[in-house]
Image (spheres, rainbow, N blue to C red):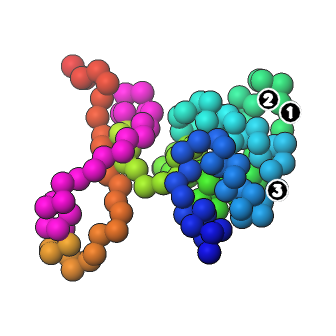
Amino acid sequence: MQKQAESTKPIRSLEDALERCQILGMRVSRQRRFILELLWQANEHLSAREIYDRLNQEGKEIGHTSVYQNLEALSSQGIIECIERCDGRLYGNISDAHSHVNCLDTNQILDVHIELPEEFIREVEEKTGVKITEYTINFYGYRQVPS
């Protein structure tokens, strides 16, 4: 019973991510730790290639295959976030429900926790007949207004 409660706790820190790996029986290999540390240090969404490049630039030798396999394992277990985009997957360090601001001029994705007014959620439920348990919103915009 205790383990189930712990496995649903939001992952908000590197320590939470490492703890979730242990709870799930996932081995925290050197490579897996490197990837998790990088995602928490970077605090942005990165492609597998960017993760590979950054780790190797830091002198943490890791192979392409190892990066891809570890990202797949971590995201499939809900330890990290995986965002599917037309130009590939991006990985981030927050795995609980949250929204995104997509910056169109910098191509960045920013995490934001937004709470919608209760009456708005009720209106959506009434219109759809679906009980809303969680939600994410995608915002799109520019840091600098295009001329």
Distance in Å between CA atoms under marks 1 and 3: 19 Å
Residue 130: which quarter of the image? bottom left
The residue that mark 2 highlights is: 56
Residue that carries the numbered disc 1 in the rendered image = 61
Query: Furthest-bottom residue in view?
Result: 129
Report if residue 105 lies within the magenta region: yes
Above-or-below relation of 133 to 26: below
Identify the amino acid type marked 1: Glu
- Is the Cβ of the residue at disc 1 closer than 8 Å to that at disc 2? yes
Apparent side of residue 140 relative to residue 36 in the rendered image (left or right)? left
147 lies left or right of 63: left
Residue placed most toward the observer, 55 or 107 = 55
Mark 2 neighbour density, 10 Å: few (under 14) some (14–19) many (20 or more)? few
- Of the two numbered discs 2 and 3 on the same chain, state the one appearing first in sequence: 3
Q: Position of residue 122 (x, y in %)?
A: 17, 68
Q: Amino acid at mark 2?
A: Asn
User: Residue 55 placed where, x, y %?
Assistant: 75, 31
Question: What residue is shown with label 3?
Answer: 27
Label 3, secondary structure: give it.
loop
* Label 1 element class: loop
Sequence-wise first label, 1 or 2: 2
Question: What range of the chain is rendered magenta?
Answer: 103-124
Depicted 15 relative to depicted 134: above or below: above
Q: Is residue 16 left or right of residue 112?
A: right
Q: Secondary structure at mark 2?
A: helix
Within-10-Å neighbours for mark 3: few <14, some 14–19, many 20+: few
- Residue depicted at 30% across the width and 46% down the height: 114
Residue at 36% across, 45% down:
113
